[in-house]
Image (spheres, helix red, strand yellow):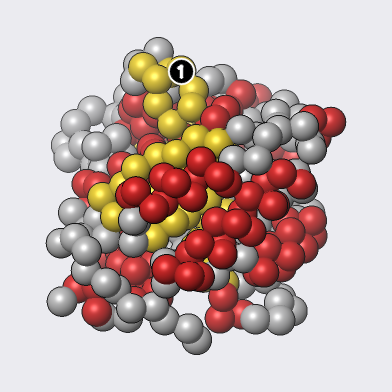
């Protein structure tokens, strides 16, 4: 397993994130923000373990636009030389776009020459095409970081260059409100368009007449991060439906829910149970009818619901905060030297 030498140019590692320009979005409650900054950069900053900067690059919005964007590596190399980051991380790039691949090769060459680790973070490393793209990118990427799988993909030729983590959460949004009111009994806030399995799973609960808040989440409903997090903080229970034809994976809602102290109701799978203890830290279900009955049961016995919710939150605080997330990445790269 390769490790790098932390050169201690600064008191803390400085990370340069590279993401597509269209990741810079407008949210009504947070003005112009960047999803990569919200998901990774700001949690790094508030952890106190490092600092960061964002660089936005041209990227095709559609598959039909691939090959039409300009090379961005010449300008990027000049920025790298000026900034001298300790770590370069690319997020949400189109690995099928030839100019992106060529530019990444150039950035990878600069990182090799300067001894700077070059990482790729994957929010969904579950499809065959994603895994194949990650294997091709090993020519210039040093380590792939997956935030949605407890184990690296089966059969990869160089497993030491894959690191499984989780979806870390910004403590300014996703936090336990203490004894604050939780008027929402149970929520599901996630995409449903084009997801018939989710609609079918939720139908018995919706038809039951039990109190239930349903929304399209940040993607379908364009909720701001602030509004999205507020729903979790004011919910007694949060539902997550994990379904993918390739493998089980762990959605961000798992860690968003337990960070906020809500009782996580999770579709049973062999991925979430690698992070949390079923029936201790969260409650699994297998069918829509079982989900309906589980919600009804914990509405009748709120003290039991709160006990499991508090256990899940305690595990999050002990293992999955931004500090734990970035410590795992930095230690993988530099061993213990980055702490000294």
Of residue 110 and residue 1, the one placed in the foreground of this image is 110
Whole-percent x, y for residue 274 in the image = 51, 70
Question: Which quarter of the picture shows residue 337?
Answer: bottom left
Q: Relative to 53, does residue 69 appear above or below in the rendering?
A: above
Could you tell me which secondary element the residue under label 1 belongs to?
Answer: strand
Left or right of residue 131: residue 284 = left
Which residue was labeled with disc 1? 26
Q: In which quarter of the image is the C terminus?
A: bottom left
Whole-percent x, y for residue 316 in the image = 32, 58
Residue at 34 percent across and 69 percent down: it is 330
Of residue 134 and residue 57, the one placed in the foreground of this image is 57
Q: Relative to 97, does residue 273 appear above or below in the rendering?
A: below
Label 1 CA crowd tier, 10 Å (few <14, some 14–19, many 20+): few
Q: Relative to 155, does residue 286 appear above or below in the rendering?
A: above
Residue at 61 percent across and 72 percent down: it is 152
Question: Which quarter of the picture shows residue 247?
Answer: bottom right
Of residue 246 and residue 5, the one placed in the foreground of this image is 5
Residue at 17 percent across and 40 percent down: it is 178
The answer to whether one can see residue 10 in this image is yes
């Amino acid at each position: 397993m390769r490790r790098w030498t932390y050169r201690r140019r600064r008191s803390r590692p400085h990370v340069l994130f590279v993401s597509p320009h269209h990741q810079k979005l407008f949210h009504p409650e947070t003005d112009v923000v960047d999803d990569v900054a919200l998901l990774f950069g700001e949690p790094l900053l508030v952890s106190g373990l490092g600092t960061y900067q964002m660089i936005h690059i041209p990227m095709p919005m559609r598959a039909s636009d691939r090959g039409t964007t300009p090379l961005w590596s010449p300008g990027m190399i000049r920025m790298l030389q000026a900034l001298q980051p300790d770590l370069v991380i690319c997020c949400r790039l189109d690995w099928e776009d030839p100019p992106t691949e060529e530019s990444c090769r150039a950035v990878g060459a600069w990182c090799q020459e300067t001894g700077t680790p070059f990482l790729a973070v994957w929010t969904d490393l579950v499809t065959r095409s994603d895994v194949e793209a990650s294997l091709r990118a090993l020519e210039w990427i040093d380590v792939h970081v997956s935030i949605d799988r407890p184990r690296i993909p089966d059969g990869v030729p160089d497993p030491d260059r894959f690191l499984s983590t989780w979806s870390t959460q910004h403590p300014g949004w996703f936090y336990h409100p203490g004894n604050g009111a939780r008027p929402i009994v149970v929520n599901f806030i996630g995409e449903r368009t084009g997801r018939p399995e989710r609609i079918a799973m939720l139908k018995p609960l919706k038809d039951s007449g039990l109190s239930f808040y349903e929304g399209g989440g940040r993607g379908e409903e364009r909720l701001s991060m602030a509004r999205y997090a507020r729903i979790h903080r004011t919910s007694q229970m949060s539902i997550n439906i994990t379904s993918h034809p390739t493998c089980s994976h762990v959605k961000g809602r798992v860690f968003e829910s337990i960070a906020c102290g809500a009782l996580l109701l999770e579709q049973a799978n062999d991925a979430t149970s690698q992070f949390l203890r079923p029936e201790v830290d969260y409650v699994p279900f297998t069918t829509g009818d079982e989900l309906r009955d589980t919600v009804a049961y914990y509405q009748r016995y709120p003290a039991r619901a709160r006990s499991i919710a508090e256990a899940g939150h305690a595990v999050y605080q002990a293992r999955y905060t931004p500090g734990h997330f970035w410590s795992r990445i930095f230690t993988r790269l530099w061993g213990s030297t980055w702490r000294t």
